[in-house]
Image (cartoon, rainbow, N blue to C red):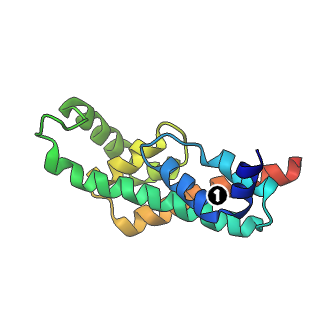
């Protein structure tokens, strides 16, 4: 456990990478890493909030970019989403609109929402604003509850 504790107490890069990967379609739980850093490191909550948020937001921007590029490859056999699945995602996004990006922080549905935003060609500035708001507020709540209960 000593090596893990040492890594956690000093590695803002690790927190950034964990938060980044958790926002992509890769599995990961950045909240656990954030809480471990809050409990074991000497970094301020503000530093942890900024690092985790930046990683998570940039991971969502990657999803957006992949969504923007996705339609170029939809006819390929290896393309991982069927035409029916893509149509459903586009219909869902059209129905709920750009404000659904505020749910980007929600497990399971958040990552596909950010990809759908790219597919639907949502304005990137509005996308970044809404994703930043939702991701940062989520981490603020997590840290706030941790401090309240610790």
Residue identifier under label 1: 137
Q: From this viewpoint, is residue 148 visible? A: yes
Seen from the viewer's position, the closer of residues 96 and 40 is 40
Q: Is residue 86 above or below residue 145?
A: above
Seen from the viewer's position, the closer of residues 87 and 11 is 11
Where the N terminus falls, by quadrant?
A: top right
| Image x and y of residue 130, in percent | 49, 60
Seen from the viewer's position, the closer of residues 132 and 99 is 132
| Image x and y of residue 123, in percent | 33, 64
- Label 1 neighbourhood size at 10 Å, few (<14), some (14-19), many (20+)? some
Secondary element type, mark 1? helix
| Image x and y of residue 101, in percent | 45, 52
- Left or right of 149 on screen, residue 102: left
Furthest-front residue in view?
3
Q: From this viewpoint, is residue 141 visible? A: no
Q: Residue drawn at (30%, 53%), measured in percent from left and top?
A: 66
Q: Residue drawn at (53%, 57%), measured in percent from left and top?
A: 17
Q: Is residue 108 above or below residue 120?
A: above
| Image x and y of residue 16, in percent | 57, 60
In the rendered image, which quarter is residue 139 located in? bottom right
Counting labels gives 1
Q: Residue drawn at (39%, 42%), measured in percent from left and top?
A: 112
Q: Residue drawn at (35%, 44%), measured in percent from left and top?
A: 93
Seen from the viewer's position, the closer of residues 14 and 121 is 14
């Amino acid at each position: 456990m000593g090596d893990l504790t040492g890594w956690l107490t000093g590695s803002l890069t690790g927190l950034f990478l964990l938060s980044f990967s958790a926002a992509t379609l890769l599995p990961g739980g950045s909240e656990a890493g954030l809480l471990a850093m809050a409990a074991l490191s000497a970094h301020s909550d503000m530093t942890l909030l900024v690092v985790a948020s930046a990683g998570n937001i940039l991971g969502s921007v990657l999803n957006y970019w992949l969504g923007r590029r996705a339609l170029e490859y939809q006819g390929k056999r290896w393309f991982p989403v069927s035409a029916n699945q893509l149509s459903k995602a586009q219909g869902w996004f059209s129905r709920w609109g750009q404000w659904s990006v505020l749910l980007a922080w929600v497990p399971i549905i958040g990552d596909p929402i950010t990809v759908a935003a790219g597919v639907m060609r949502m304005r990137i500035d509005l996308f970044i604003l809404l994703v930043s708001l939702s991701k940062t507020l989520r981490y603020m709540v997590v840290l706030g509850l941790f401090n309240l209960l610790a």
